[in-house]
Amino acid sequence: MGKQLSGWRTRWAAIGAACAVALGAGGFGVVNAVVSSGERSVYVPIVPVRVLDTRSTNEITNGTRRLVVEGVITTADGVSRQVVPTDASAVAVNITATSTDKNGGYGFVTAFPCLTSSDAVPNASSLNFETGVDVANGLNVTTSANGSICLYVYGTADLIVDVAGYFVDHNHDDRYYTETEVDAALAETVRETEMVPVIVPGPQNPALVAGGSTGTEVALGIGPEGFPVLAAYDDNTFLDLRVCANATCTRGSGSTIDQYATMPAVSVLGNGNPVVVYQMGHLMPVPTYDMWVAMCGDPQCSFITRRTKIDGDGVGAGESGLSPSVAVGFDGFPIIAYGHLPAGSSDGELILTLCDDFDCSSTSRRVLATAVGGVVFFTSVAIAPNGNPVIAYFETASEDLHLVVCDDPSCTSSSSVVVDGDGTGPQATGRYASLAIGVDGFPIISYFDDTSETVKVAACTDLACTEPTITTIDHVGNGMIRKTTSIDIGPDGNPVVAYFHVDDQSVRAATCADTACSMFTTSQISLSAGGPLAMKVGRYGRPLVAYQLDMGGMSAPELWAAELYLLDDFRTDDRVMCPASMSMVC
């Protein structure tokens, strides 16, 4: 079994390679141990990652495909992760052209930096192809200001693009690292499971939170460096965003998002900047609930560039922004799913709003489903390997778990299926749904089943999820509390599920042993928790769980805090230690 990704690395590997390949005026070479001071680019090799495969979508014919390569992107296997950091200056790629057909005796591909797919194509070629003959070429391509490259095809071809490394600017300072400097750098790495208490304090008077919330809500994303991006409330009922500068969030920066903002969701755009979507609620002069989005102005979210209402009438005639979720499309822009109850109607809707730019200054709104006599809640959106959005949700009329699969990246048409439930009620199947895309490219959903009082996982065996494999993870009990679930894909390709256990008021994690989660190990993370939680797999493949921590107990139920827990990567046999607070087999 291979070594786990952990903080146990050699001194020099921990802070960067002692020898690096430099890209300068003289081309490629090996950087000497002592070099002249100044800025130059160094090459950082990585395990190759496939970032594009048009064989699962549409071939390119006499046209350009723009590809975002920096920051958090959705790779060809459907997993959202950072492959190339946002400060990279170029990428090393291998481009393969297959299913080729020349145009008038010529066929070639040109790779170049671009801001949009309409940018002028250089008078050059990166590879030339013959009809019906596969051909590949490795090259270095400078990235543009928005972290993109473009691929122009003259003729027709399917393109496969793998990233093998990238270049970043580095200031060489004429010396080696000393042992003291290395040890200081190593102190910033995370080795074992750590609990980080109280990221942000909770409100003293939760009744002030719009919508009658009785406790915090947390949202979690992963930044370009693999560190947490956490949204939670402060003690003045403001929603704050913290961009962590290390895995345990002891250092970081951030901004206040908005007041009376509830049901937040967080992601990181193609430009590396965080985005927060939320329902904005006001009780005066009339109860009003609208869908809002806030855009950070930089990756550290040191300021907010734009707060925008994207849905709702603002006068309390209807309700929008119910249980929103956000994903990032292949263009790097936000895609937002949420429930909406039109003014004067008793039929709720599932809405998908696609932002047309990083600031969401213009949008495209789609009504994907209608819940006749019900309301749509617990949306969860992800992007399939073909670039098309997929949305899981629960609606109160049938009380079932539903899935909508878009037919194109803009979701101009879609299909839907009931994943679990019989449509009869009155018990609910599908509350607190959380959706990820597995390594097989198919949806996998965690959710709560009120009928059996269990947490379940539905693993789709195709993109349309016509015959899902459903596994019961745990019997957790029932009660008037938010029985949240959250799912993500670990570095081994198997899901990890975090969920709230009602009976003992604890947060637990299920580590799946296969891609369908038919086998798993459960672990207790924290007692005295309050229900709302979020989980993402972060740097080094280690899951992070953010959740509400009950600080007051029965004597002071209004006191709570948002807490962040970093789990060890406990799937491999060569881990260093077993955290005492987790009931797992070491």
Image: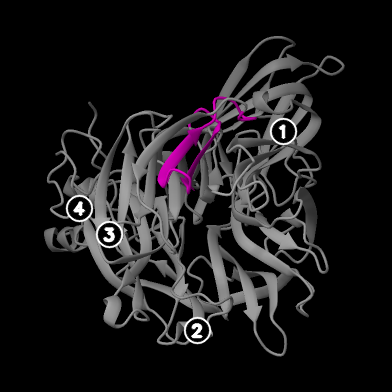
Q: Position of residue 273 (x, y in %)?
A: 55, 63
Q: Is residue 539 visible?
A: yes
Mark nearer the N terminus (3 vs 4):
3
Which residue sits at x=40%, y=36%? 472
| 3D distance between C-alphas at marks 3 and 1 | 38 Å
- How much space separates mark 2 and mark 1, taking CA atoms? 64 Å
Q: Are marks 2 and 1 in contact (CB under 8 Å)?
A: no
Q: Which residue is mark 2?
A: 207
Question: Is 523 placed above or below 155 here?
Answer: below
**Amino acid type indicated by mark 1:** Ala
Numbered disc 3: secondary structure? loop
Q: Residues within 10 Å of mark 3 (few under 14, many from 20)?
A: few
Label 4 sits on residue: 191
Label 1: element kind: loop
Q: Secondary structure at mark 4?
A: loop
Q: Residues within 10 Å of mark 2 (few under 14, many from 20)?
A: some
Which mark identifies residue 174? 3
Label 1 sits on residue: 124
The magenta span reads 439-465
Q: Are marks 3 and 4 in contact (CB under 8 Å)?
A: no
The local crowd at label 1, few if under 14, some if 14 to 19, many if 20 or more residues have their Cα within 10 Å, is: few
Q: Nearer the viewer's eye, disc 2 or disc 4?
A: 2
Report whether residue 490 is seen: no
Name which residue lies at 44% across and 44% down.
Answer: 488
Residue type for callout 2: Ala
